[in-house]
Image (cartoon, coloured by chain):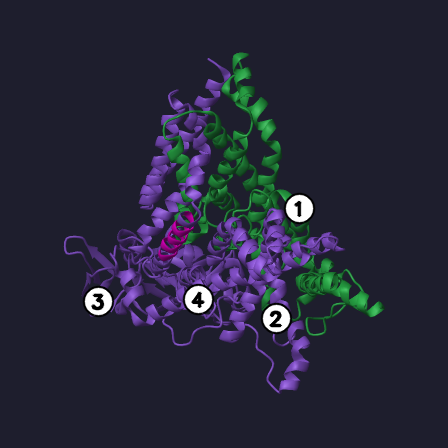
């Protein structure tokens, strides 16, 4: 066998053992989408690399796996999520919710408050042990454990030999703690309990400096029992039956938390488009997203074009230095520039308000609270993005200007056109032919310019009285981010992914227009 | 006579210098400001100014060895993630580009067109799905789940691989096929043609694409912010924006210093490769 063949089979063996390992786990966690992704990739890899028929695919597949897994697949999954109620309180599947509810416990009334003598020991590892003297038949000794470890702990054992004639005889290697020692360790001891059986445990209740401390017995029972045939759970404490409604169990009209995730059809879409208190923010954000992307491209383009026209002059000194400096803002990572601008714009300490303070005094107005009011935040966002964007526009317009044939301009001059006429009638139209696809590209980029918006203004200032977290400078992608991750009102994954679907649709629309307008698709196709 | 000469000069050149100087100030002021402030010996943003009275390295020193602000860890994380992801991105993209450029197969045009269409949508648009997907991966395969660099690198790999293979393919098309035909006649295998002829000839563009991808990943905020929860695993973009914004005024010198450290290598890379980056490759979406 050839070396490469050995290598190939070895790789496939490792890959497939990995697949076989992960499949049962996805089933346990009910991650069906992940399971289907893993199966799809496993299928592709095995078909392509086991046979010799798909030679080109052997080259393409490694990259394609990542494209499928983390670009195409999330887009599909995103669509799926937009049809669910997936959000805080509805994260789990129904069977996971039943498991959680069935593990909840309560303390029945007749089991509360039995008191007895409790002694505390420490072994050589300084771990705590309890001895509970409940009655003659129950002198129970065992390790005291924290709440998290209760289910893994051994039950306490009956050790009558440890109490003889009312005196405590510590087992060898153990040290009996006095009341003072117990007080010194009281924060730790509060967290510990002695597990007596599945539902019963003993805790330190009152520390006594003279004589034995008091322990308290508490006995717990399973709070909810699930009945599959009637699809309900019974609350054993109050003996009420709670039926499974759409995505929660409901007892006497009250929903039990957590609920589970279900398909809700077009509910999220309906909410976005018809619920007044969500539709308002959405249309506000959508409008601003378009305004922001449009104005930002317009401003950056105007400045860039203006500068390249100004510098487009033969024998102008320092041209190269000017050009080099104009490119600088483009060379710095946006997250850094935005942070710096945030400092300059700071209304109380920033240098911009220091500069403007003579103007404020002259006009007798309050200093502008940059980023804190709607208008100032929107202006600031546009100002900073112009700073970030004009170098790119300067570069491309300079290139385009230089490629316009000189004799065209001279011919116009000879015919008696003024320089303004020459610019608007000849230079500008020619410029737009090569620049407009780039302008549309820039529009599409700014349409989703999350970094700028989120880091500069955080989308703020907040719109007061809205049902969802939204601010005056939020664009669609930052709005979606707030809904899903950081809005402070839980994780509304379903609603957020619905907003993402809207962005997908709009980006598709922009691209379709751009392809139509610039005939780029034909060129691409011709290139293939 | 002198005055009219000046007037002529001003009409011809002078106003251009004036306009250019105004925009030079606009472009460079924030950069200079943060640069000088990172070495300046003032307490906070309130009394900061462009030209400091005395210089100090204390802000840079504060950045190293502060366990609450593990800046050097963030830098290391960022370089690690960006270099690994950009490398594999270019590597896998080159493999795919080779097939698209040199091998004839059914569905070649269709798959290239699909690539172009898929890459119209930035991968972070589906960030909710990416988050939930990796949330589940955390259960099944914890080493590549949410909060790990491994998982984040995987996401970055998917993000621009289509675009990159498209660019590389375009460049490979310009290499004359007579070269590999000659090699084929001499009995070279497909892999040898790739590794001995095509890949070396493509190297200049591969370096440029590596740099562009590297800068893009280095500057990413949204995916890293969703992914990384543990402070010690953060990237610079997440770190400086999460830690320092709380007390902008007091931390100003340190913010300036950390900005300078984060921005300088990228700015130098960018200026060095400026012609290539802004040359044929700009599609309006290259840089974030």
Write down the chain letter for disc 4.
A
Question: Which chain's residue wears label 1?
Answer: B
**Labels 2, 1: one chain:** no
- Disc number lying in front (3 or 1): 1
Residue pointed to by mark 4 = A288
* First along the sequence among labels 3 and 4: 3
Q: Is residue A462 visible to the viewer in this orientation of the structure?
A: yes
| Identity of the residue drawn at 38% across and 50% down | A512
Locate residue A325, reporting x and y percent.
Answer: 70, 56
- Decide whether residue A101 is among the magenta residues: no
Q: Is residue A67 visible?
A: no
Q: According to the image, label 3 marks what residue?
A: A251
Q: Quadrant of residue A503?
A: bottom left
Q: Is mark 1 on a helix, strand or loop?
A: helix
Q: Identify the residue at the far right of this view.
A: B2
The lab-note entry on whether marks 3 and 1 share a chain reads no
Q: Name the residue under label 1.
A: B269
B168 shown above or below A455: above
Total marks in image = 4
Chain shaded green: B
Q: In this view, does B221 lie to the left or right of A39?
A: right
Magenta segment boundaries in residue numbering: A502-515
Give the image location of residue B179, x and y in percent.
56, 20
Q: Tag 4, which secondary structure?
A: helix
Return the residue found at the far left.
Answer: A229
Q: Chain A is drawn in which colour?
A: purple
Mark 2 vs mark 1, CA separation in Å: 28 Å
């Amino acid at each position: 066998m050839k070396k490469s063949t050995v290598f190939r089979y070895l790789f496939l063996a490792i890959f497939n053992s990995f697949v076989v390992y992960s499949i049962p786990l996805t089933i346990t966690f009910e991650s069906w989408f992940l399971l289907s992704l893993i199966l799809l990739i496993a299928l592709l890899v095995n078909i392509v690399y086991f046979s010799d028929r798909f030679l080109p695919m052997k080259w393409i597949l490694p990259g394609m796996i990542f494209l499928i897994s983390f670009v195409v697949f999330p887009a599909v999954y995103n669509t799926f999520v937009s049809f669910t109620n997936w959000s805080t309180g509805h994260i789990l599947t129904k069977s996971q919710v039943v498991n959680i509810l069935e593990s909840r416990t309560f303390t029945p009334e007749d089991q509360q408050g039995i008191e007895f003598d409790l002694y505390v020991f420490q072994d050589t590892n300084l771990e705590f042990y309890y001895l509970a003297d409940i009655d003659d038949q129950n002198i129970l000794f065992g390790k005291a454990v924290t709440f998290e470890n209760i289910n893994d702990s051994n039950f306490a054992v009956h050790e009558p030999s440890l109490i003889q004639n009312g005196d405590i005889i510590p087992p060898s290697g153990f040290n009996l703690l006095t009341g003072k020692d117990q007080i010194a360790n009281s924060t730790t001891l509060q967290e510990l309990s002695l597990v007596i059986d599945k539902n019963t445990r003993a805790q330190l209740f009152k520390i006594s400096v003279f004589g034995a401390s008091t322990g308290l017995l508490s006995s717990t029972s399973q709070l909810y029992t699930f009945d599959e045939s009637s699809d309900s759970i019974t609350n054993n404490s109050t003996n009420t039956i709670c039926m499974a409604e759409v995505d929660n169990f409901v007892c006497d009209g009250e929903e039990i938390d957590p609920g589970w995730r279900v398909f809700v059809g077009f509910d999220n879409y309906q909410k976005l488009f018809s619920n007044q208190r969500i539709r308002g923010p959405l249309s506000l954000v959508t409008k601003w997203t378009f305004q922001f992307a449009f104005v930002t491209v317009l401003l950056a383009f105007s400045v860039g074009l203006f500068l390249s026209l100004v510098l487009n002059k033969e024998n102008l000194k320092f041209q190269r230095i000017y050009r080099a400096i104009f490119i600088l803002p483009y060379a710095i990572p946006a997250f850094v520039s935005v942070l710096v601008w945030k400092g300059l714009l700071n209304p109380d300490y920033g240098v911009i308000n220091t500069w403007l303070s003579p103007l404020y005094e002259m006009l007798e107005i309050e200093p502008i609270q940059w980023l804190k009011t709607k208008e100032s935040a929107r202006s600031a966002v546009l100002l900073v993005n112009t700073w970030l964007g004009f170098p790119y526009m300067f570069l491309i317009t300079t290139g385009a200007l230089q490629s316009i044939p000189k004799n065209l301009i001279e011919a116009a001059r000879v015919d008696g056109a003024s320089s303004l006429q020459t610019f608007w009638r000849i230079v500008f139209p020619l410029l737009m032919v090569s620049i407009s696809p780039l302008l549309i590209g820039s529009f599409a980029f700014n349409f989703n310019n999350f970094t700028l918006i989120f880091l500069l203004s955080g989308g703020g200032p907040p719109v007061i009285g809205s049902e969802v977290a939204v601010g005056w400078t939020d664009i669609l992608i930052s709005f979606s981010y707030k809904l899903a991750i950081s809005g402070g009102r839980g994780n509304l994954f379903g609603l957020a992914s619905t907003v993402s679907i809207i962005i997908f649709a709009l980006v598709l629309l922009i691209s379709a227009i751009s392809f139509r307008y610039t005939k780029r698709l034909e060129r691409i196709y011709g290139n293939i | 006579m002198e005055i009219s000469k000046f007037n002529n000069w001003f009409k011809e050149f002078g106003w251009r210098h004036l306009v250019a100087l105004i925009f030079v100030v606009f472009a460079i002021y924030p950069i200079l400001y943060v640069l000088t402030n990172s070495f300046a010996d003032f307490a906070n943003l309130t009394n900061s100014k462009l030209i400091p009275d005395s210089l100090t390295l204390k802000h840079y020193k504060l950045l190293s060895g502060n366990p609450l602000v593990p800046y050097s860890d963030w830098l290391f994380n960022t370089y690690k993630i960006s270099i690994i992801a950009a490398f594999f991105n270019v590597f896998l993209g080159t493999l795919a580009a080779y097939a698209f450029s040199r091998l004839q197969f059914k569905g070649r045009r269709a798959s290239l067109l699909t690539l172009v269409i898929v890459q119209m949508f930035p991968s972070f648009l589906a960030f909710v799905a990416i988050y939930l997907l990796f949330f589940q991966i955390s259960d099944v395969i914890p080493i590549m789940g949410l909060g790990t660099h491994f998982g984040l690198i995987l996401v970055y790999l998917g993000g621009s691989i289509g675009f990159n293979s498209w660019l590389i393919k375009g460049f490979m098309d310009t290499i004359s096929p007579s070269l590999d035909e000659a090699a084929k006649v001499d009995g070279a295998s497909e892999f040898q043609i790739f590794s001995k002829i095509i890949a070396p000839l493509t190297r200049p563009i591969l370096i440029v694409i590596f740099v562009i991808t590297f800068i893009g990943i280095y500057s990413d905020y949204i995916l890293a912010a969703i992914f990384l929860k543990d402070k010690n695993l953060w990237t610079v973009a997440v770190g400086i924006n999460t830690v320092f914004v709380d007390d902008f005024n007091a931390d100003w010198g340190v913010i300036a210093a950390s900005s300078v450290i984060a921005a300088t290598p990228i700015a130098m890379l960018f200026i060095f490769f400026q012609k290539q980056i802004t040359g044929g490759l700009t599609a309006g979406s290259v840089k974030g």
